[in-house]
Amino acid sequence: MDSRDCLAYAERCLVSVIGLEDVMVIATSDSVLVAHKDRAQDVKTVVEELKAEGRKEVELHPRSYRPWGYTERINAGDRFAVQSMMIKPGKGLSLQSHLHRAEHWVVVSGTVEITINGQTRLLTENQSAYVPLGAQHTLHNRGKIPVQMIEVQSGTYLQEDDIVRHAGTSQQS
């Protein structure tokens, strides 16, 4: 409203500007940038300052792309993490286990083949599965549409380096 030569972009929320001129507003899922358009080149300087401060937003982005699709962080705490997952048709995750966490999977759309400790079954929309701590598990989308899932991780340690991949058993396509 009453603004000129502005750029307003948001990934997930509505951004409105009032009474501004030559301003850019960029909102992603974990950060917001507001700057005069003439200062766009200073973004590099801000990023370097944020790195020096050790801000996780510089390196850790909510959406992480993988050969099989992507994960996107929704929420996290000391002993839990929630993420959405998309598995591309014909793709799957390697056979793996975790030393410090369990996982709960809920299928939002599509059909996914799951294997937990050698037991394979199909999960469809609104169905779920529990993966106990230490269980060998994998997911595979053998269908023609992307699978959308929610994963809830719980345990004492939730970082990516808790994944133990089992050699020669990759389901990745």
Image (spheres, helix red, strand yellow):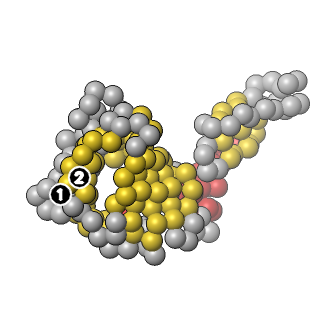
Q: Amino acid at mark 1?
A: Gly
Residue depicted at 46% across the width and 66% down the height: 154
Instruction: Tell me residue 164's x, y (percent).
Output: 26, 67
Residue depicted at 66% across the width and 41% down the height: 27
Q: Quadrant of residue 18?
A: top right
Q: Residues within 10 Å of mark 1 (few under 14, many from 20)?
A: few
Question: Tag on residue 13?
Answer: none
Question: Is 51 above or below relative to 12?
Answer: below
Q: Quadrant of residue 127?
A: top left
Instruction: Tell me residue 67's x, y (percent).
Output: 29, 44
Instruction: Tell me residue 80's x, y (percent).
Output: 51, 65
Residue depicted at 69% across the width and 46% down the height: 33
State whether residue 40 appears in this view.
no
Question: Tag on residue 118?
Answer: 1
- In the rendered structure, the answer to whether residue 157 lies left or right of residue 138 reads right
Question: Tag on residue 115?
Answer: 2
Instruction: Tell me residue 113's x, y (percent).
Output: 26, 43
> Could you tell me if the residues under marks 1 and 2 are in contact, i.e. CB atoms within 8 Å?
yes
What's the distance in space between the residues labelled 1 and 2, CA to CA? 6 Å
Question: Is 20 above or below relative to 101?
Answer: above
Which quadrant is the C terminus positioned in? top left
| Residue at the left extreme of this rendering | 168
Q: Residues within 10 Å of mark 2 (few under 14, many from 20)?
A: some
